[in-house]
Image (cartoon, rainbow, N blue to C red):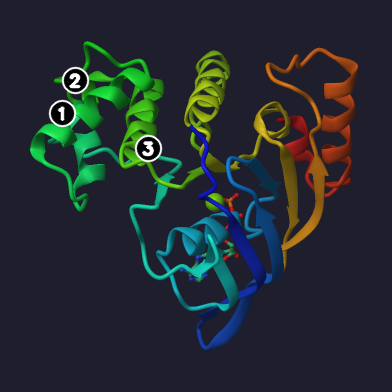
């Protein structure tokens, strides 16, 4: 259950890439504090730096200005404290479901028996009992994403980062996995950041929705979602919050408004 670990404090974060000798500013003065156990959704148009922000938090890149603090300590490199699920599940085709999940424990200081137990618990958590020995090609897209979520969680990280994890799934599977993610988040009490293109998904799951804008990527507004779970998409209160998030995009992104 929730403990006090998992406070993420991003302070005046700036990031730029160099493309053909020219500086390309990608993130501009991002400040965001996320409390232990909080669920934060991030939305914004393509190219506004959402994946870059997650890559920095997970520690895949360290060339930036400003501070990223986890429980008051500057993050350095990747760590078992931070689990990430990428848009494509990135499972290894030559490993079974259980071995793909066990990869998340590769560097953990546990005995083989403890590792087996953790893997079994997390297979149950994502509802994949009976598929332990299955190969990735035998899974549906939704099942593969569950394996990826189990792999990110198996080491009990303080933070779970999800980069459009359900983007490639059909609407039914997506709605189902949103419920599952909600259940897992409530059971584990883990600090969670979800990047999504889907404003309804962002409002359905998040304690707050961070709306970013592009060129360079900035935070435009943080919209709180003061609704208790389970949330009903059909209610007036839900629709009003969704509309206030959508209003931040204006007319510049018809594709997103249509989503
Ligand atoms: N390694 C890189 N080198 C140069 N530019 C990069 C690199 N990675 C990202 N960028 C640029 O940084 C900007 C932000 O990219 P990023 O992938 O973070 O956007 P995003 O918000 O995740 O977009 P999407 O919604 O399409 O996934 C883009 O302009 C992209 O071209
Ligand atoms: Mg992205």
**Residue extending furthest toward the left:** 112
Residue placed most toward the observer, 92 or 181: 181
Residue 24 horizontal side relative to residue 90, left or right? right
Q: How far across and down, in percent of the image, does residue 253 sit?
A: 78, 45
Q: Which is nearer the N-term, disc 3 or disc 2?
A: 2
Helix, strand or loop for disc 2:
loop
Query: Which residue has dot 1 on it?
Result: 96
Determine which residue is flagged by label 3: 153
In the image, residue 16 sits, relative to residue 142, either above or below, namely below
User: How many numbered marks are there?
Assistant: 3
Q: Quadrant of residue 232?
A: top right
Tell me the residue at 48%/78% (across/down).
Answer: 63
Residue named by callout 2: 132
Q: Is residue 21 left or right of residue 90?
A: right
In this view, the mark in front (1 or 3) = 3
Cβ at disc 2 under 8 Å from ligand 2: no
Q: Quick one: label 1, few (<14), some, or many (20+) residues within 10 Å?
A: some
Q: Residue at x 21, y 11 (%)?
A: 130
Ligand 1 sits in quadrant: bottom right
Task: Indicate the position of residue 10 as horizontal and vertical percent values.
Answer: 63, 65
**Which residue is at a point 52% across and 21% down the rendered structure image?**
183
């Amino acid at each position: 259950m929730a403990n006090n670990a998992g406070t993420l404090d991003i302070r005046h974060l700036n990031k730029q890439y160099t493309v053909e000798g020219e500086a390309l500013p990608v993130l501009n003065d991002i400040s965001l504090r996320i409390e232990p156990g909080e669920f934060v959704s991030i939305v914004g148009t393509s190219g506004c730096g959402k994946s870059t922000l997650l890559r920095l938090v997970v520690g895949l890149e360290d060339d930036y200005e400003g501070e990223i603090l986890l429980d008051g300590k500057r993050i350095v490199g990747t760590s078992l404290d931070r689990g990430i699920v990428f848009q494509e599940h990135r499972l290894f085709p030559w490993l079974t479901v259980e071995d793909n999940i066990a990869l998340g424990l590769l560097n953990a200081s546990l005995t083989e028996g403890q590792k087996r137990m953790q893997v079994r618990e997390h297979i149950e958590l994502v509802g994949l009992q009976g598929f332990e020995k299955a190969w990735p090609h035998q899974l549906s897209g939704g099942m593969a994403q569950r394996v990826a979520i189990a792999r990110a969680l198996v080491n009990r990280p303080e933070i779970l980062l999800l980069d459009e994890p359900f983007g490639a799934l059909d609407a039914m599977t997506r709605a189902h996995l949103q419920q599952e993610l909600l259940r897992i988040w409530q059971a584990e009490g883990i600090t969670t950041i979800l990047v999504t293109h889907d404003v309804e998904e962002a409002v359905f799951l998040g304690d707050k929705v961070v709306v970013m804008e592009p060129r360079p990527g900035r935070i435009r507004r943080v919209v709180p979602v003061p609704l208790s779970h389970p949330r009903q998409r059909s209610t007036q209160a839900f629709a009003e919050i969704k509309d206030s998030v959508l209003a931040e995009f204006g007319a510049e992104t018809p594709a997103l408004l249509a989503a």
